[in-house]
Amino acid sequence: MSEREKLLSVSGLKVTFDVFPQGAMPWTKPRKLKAVDGVDFDLFAGETLGIVGESGCGKSTLARAVARMVPASAGEVLWLGKDLLGMSNRELKDVRSDVQFIFQDPLASLNPRMTIGQIIAEPLKTHTPGISKADIKTRVKAMMDRVGLLPNLINRYPHEFSGGQCQRIGIARALIINPRLIICDEPVSALDVSIQAQVINLLMELQRELGIALIFIAHDLSVVKHISTRIMVLYLGNVAEVATSKQLYADPRHPYTQALISAVPIPDPKIEKGKKIILLEGDLPSPLNPPSGCVFRSRCPRAQALCAEKRPVLEVLENGHEVACHFHD
């Protein structure tokens, strides 16, 4: 398998929800909430695409739309060259064995009535119906051992495990059918810092071993920097910047990216004390009423008249660095 094999190609993806005001009459026209507004990106085999941005910027909605968990309003999603959005449910079932999810809340994503052996085995039973019970048990125990869980705990229930252990169960469930892509929707935000490091290192180790691709969604930019090959910055459903992890932290071009990176703590007290923190004025605008032109202009220190008139396109700079800003220089 080529390292640069393109697994996923997303073009012009939009997700719009109808929002009715409280107490609306049946004939009231809904307002349109643009959760994702024209996102483009590619994902290659074996790489990790980090997605960052404030709460409400559309990170999770984008991931769910790619996996057909929420309906897309427009755009194209190609999986290995095949149109994912146009697939029937039967065709989609085959793709689901290649694309798996790890969710934010490790305990809430596990069925409390099932043992962890049943939870991890569930994808096997769904996607390989002819598999024997003995083979299922063997593969489940092997997967438990691979993610750092004792196989003799196979008959325990989720409430008997810590948050970090529950997230390992979620990882085992995602990996048991050998997917090619795992979408990690803030998988460590509910965990302690020390446990976060263990889970991140486990994901990186499994990725190197199995060659899987990851889409990793997080708020913590230091975590994203550690695990990601490339990073995509979202703001109000729009792509602000895309670059390799090294490029983005060394030379952020978009003012929103610069503000996010300036807020990341630095372990050295002297450097931390002397660094300049960029404070953004105001709150994130409502996606029900986004600013005209550039959606970031209402909080941008560089904003000019052009920003209100024209939406910036994602421009490709040197070394594949992409930025959507009229005044990125």
Image (cartoon, rainbow, N blue to C red):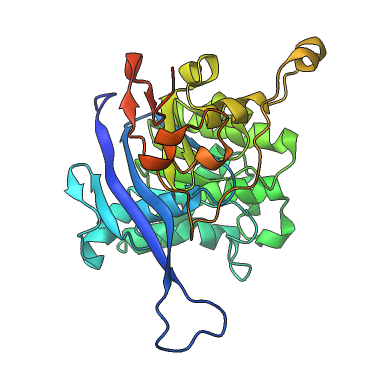
Taking the spot 62% from the left edge, 53% from the top edge, the residue there is 106
Rendered-image quadrant of the N terminus: top left
Rendered position, 266 above or below 33: above
Residue 279, given in percent of the width and then of the height, sits at: 68, 31
Taking the spot 21% from the left edge, 42% from the top edge, the residue there is 80
Residue 213, given in percent of the width and then of the height, sits at: 39, 35
Residue 131, given in percent of the width and then of the height, sits at: 34, 59
Q: Nearer the viewer, residue 249 or 46?
A: 249
Residue 244, given in percent of the width and then of the height, sits at: 43, 21
Rendered position, 44 above or below 121: above
Rendered position, 272 above or below 103: above
Q: Is residue 141 visible?
A: no
Q: Nearer the viewer, residue 111 or 21?
A: 21
Rendered-image quadrant of the C terminus: top left
Rendered position, 322 above or below 195: above
Q: Is residue 290 visible?
A: yes
The single residue placed furthest to the top in the displayed view is 270
The single residue placed furthest to the bottom in the displayed view is 26
Left/right placement of residue 23 relative to residue 9 reads right
Q: Nearer the viewer, residue 219 or 207?
A: 219
Q: Nearer the viewer, residue 57 or 206?
A: 57
**Figure label count:** 0
Left/right placement of residue 85 relative to residue 317 reads left
